[in-house]
Amino acid sequence: MSTDVFPVADDIANNALINRAQYEEMYAKSIKDPEAFWGEHGKRIDWIKPYSTVKNVNFMVPDVSIKWYEDGTLNASYNCIDRHLESRGDQTAILW
């Protein structure tokens, strides 16, 4: 495992949505209570059918299985494009 650390460029850090302290706080919450953390973040997107289970994991070989929000139903197009139309419909969606 590498221990190299690469600094974040100032222009990127200055335009980030969260700062280092906020990141550290979020990271600690994600480790302490991943179900609650990811359950809360799962609410940031729109669901056709909301999930009731955040994660379903089994790390026992040979039946390793990792499932997130498995009983929920999403529409990727709606979450990526449609839900932004009312407030940002006149802006370019993708710049290539």
Image: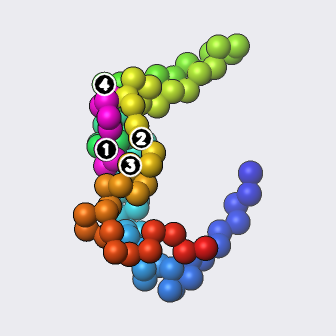
Q: Is residue 56 left or right of residue 3?
A: left
Residue 78 badge: 3
Q: Residue at x 34, y 47 (%)?
A: 45
What amino acid type should be assigned to the residue bearing mark 3? Tyr
Kindly report the distance in space between the C-alpha atoms of the residues bearing marks 3 and 1: 8 Å
| Sequence-wise first label, 3 or 4 | 4
In the image, is 54 to the left or to the right of 68? left
What residue type is disc 4 on? Ser
Spatial CA distance of label 2 from label 3 is 5 Å
The residues tagged by marks 1 and 2 sit, at their Cα atoms, a distance apart of 8 Å
- Mark before the other along the chain sequence, 3 or 1: 1
Q: Quadrant of residue 18?
A: bottom left
Q: Which residue is mark 1?
A: 46
x then y, percent, for residue 75: 41, 41
In this view, the mark in front (3 or 4): 3
Element marked by disc 1: loop
In the image, residue 55 above or below residue 1: above
Q: Which residue is mark 2?
A: 75
* Rendered view: 29 above or below 95: above
Q: Are marks 3 and 1 in contact (CB under 8 Å)?
A: yes
Residue 74 location, x and y as percent? 40, 37
Number of marks: 4
Which residue, given by chain and number where applicable, does mark 4 sit on?
52
- Seen from the viewer's position, the closer of residues 85 and 58 is 85
Mark 1 residue type:
Asp
Q: Which residues are magenta?
A: 44-51
Q: Residue at x 51, y 27 (%)?
A: 67
The front one of 34 and 4 is 34
